[in-house]
Amino acid sequence: MTRSQTLPEQLRLLFLGLLSTLVCTALATANDRSKPNIILVFADDLGWKDVGYNGTDFYQTPRIDALAKEGMVFHQAFAAAGNCAPSRACLLSGTYTPRHHVYAVGSTDRGPKKSQRLIPIPNRSGLAKDNVTLADALKAEGYATGIFGKWHLDGPDGAKPADQGFGVVFDSQKGDPNKALDRADDPKGIFSITSEAGKFMEASHAKNQPFFAYVSHHAIHTALEARPSTIEKFKAAKPGSQHNNVKYAACLYDLDVGVGKLLDKLQALGIAENTLVVLTSDNGGTQQSSQEPLRGNKGGYYEGGIREPFIAHWPGVIKSSTECQVPVISVDLFPTFLAAAGAKAPDGKLLDGENLMPLFNQTGPLKRQSIFWHFPGYLDGPVIRGRDEDIRLGFRTRPVSVIRRGDWKLHLFHEEWQLDGGREKAVASGAIELYDMVNDPGEHKNLASSEPAARDELLEDLLGWFRDSDALLPSQPNPAFDEDYAAQPGSRRKNRK
């Protein structure tokens, strides 16, 4: 403004400047609001049969069930690994285990050595710092990023969440995350995790910034905890024929209450319509909770160890009360969340999953044919109806790779494959198990000998995936293996013959 300008001219210029500022602010806000907020509720050890909408006869999950009714339920949804750390590594990296080499918690050498026929492939304790995570990718797209709860990937080979894309980090559990907090008002840190996530959502919304909230609960992992009033509620309830563990039910119910509080916060902020919520878990339920009709539990690669509750909710995009039978897996969440944000994968970032948006909005099928699992080691502790039922031999799983293609699922067990004649004798040795997942979801009847066409098609696909992913298979015999010990009465190897 110059001295020669009149007052009306000054006012006009001031008005135009103010209008320009308002328009720019509105456009920026509209641009931010066009990107949905994203919430991932990631439970710990929540089994497929543990939720009400899947038919538990004792547990109660009313808020999770309501979310399922309001959104889309995926009935064939899977964790990318059978236990905590590798599942989380797959989720956050968007890649299968052969890419990052996090196969287990701590070690792949867990269980009696006298019963291990192979030397396992070594494990990495966490995601490498230079591995671009889902949080890194969303942060680069302008998202506020926060993790609330369990990380479990910061071993010597890994990094802290603050170094892998998370701007806000909160965990109510200090030290050993599997120990009891011994707080009657905040069992497993459920409510403090929920509260801090809510504060993060509110702060991000106030700044017109889209957010990614990774709400990573410790519940319902042992040690089981619940509010005293919730425990009394289930003590007074009628036990079910399948489920009757009072403390498990109470811990799960309190987790459900926490989920409800988080959803209530979305409504209170008025942002539920522009928020994609996904709820799932890292692996199947423990042996404290039968997953029948599914076989097995956490740590194994039968369905009870890897099939998960999976709900997606996004008003205006996902129709309420919809169901999907297409097999999906947790590595799909990385490309899905990027697609929801209108973003592409970072340069040079390889992703093994597929964008689920065509399933969310029911516009088309997925392109891929198969999904995979790879565990080249030993994990102690037999599971319900697992392959090793002898407690003395003690494995939830031995080295195994798995492929799901259409209605078929094939397990390739490395011990027999490597040491008992390879492909030529794969059926006779027990190296291959093949199941029809439509007619036999409980994996009772091995069809490897009676369905050669399906068996060979899946096997070829799996072997090709080994090559494409540089999957390492254990091949060296274990000198500590004791044939006589492993063949004693009750052992898996003797019973199979």
Image (cartoon, rainbow, N blue to C red):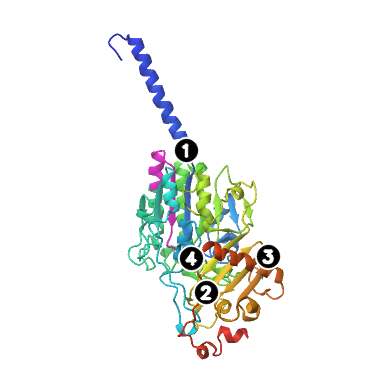
Q: Position of residue 407 (x, y in %)?
A: 67, 63
The residue that label 2 is drawn on is: 399
What residue is drawn where x is 43% and y is 53%?
Answer: 132
In front of the other: 187 or 451: 451
Q: Amino acid at mark 3?
A: Val
Query: For numbered disc 4, what is the local secondary structure?
Result: loop
The Cα–Cα distance between marks 4 and 1, rounded to whole angstroms, is 34 Å
Which residue type carries mark 2? Pro
115 w.r.t. 79: above or below: below
- SS for tag 2? loop
Q: Is residue 42 magenta?
A: no
Say which of marks 4 and 3 sits in front. Answer: 3
| Residues rendered magenta in the picture | 200-219
Closer to viewer: mark 2 or mark 3: 2
Residue 467 lies, in percent from the top left, at 55, 64
Quarter residue 6 falls in: top left
- Tell me which label, 4 or 3, sits earlier in the chain: 4
Q: Which residue is mark 4?
A: 45
Q: CA distance from mark 2 to mark 3?
A: 26 Å
Q: Which image quadrant is residue 368 in?
A: bottom right
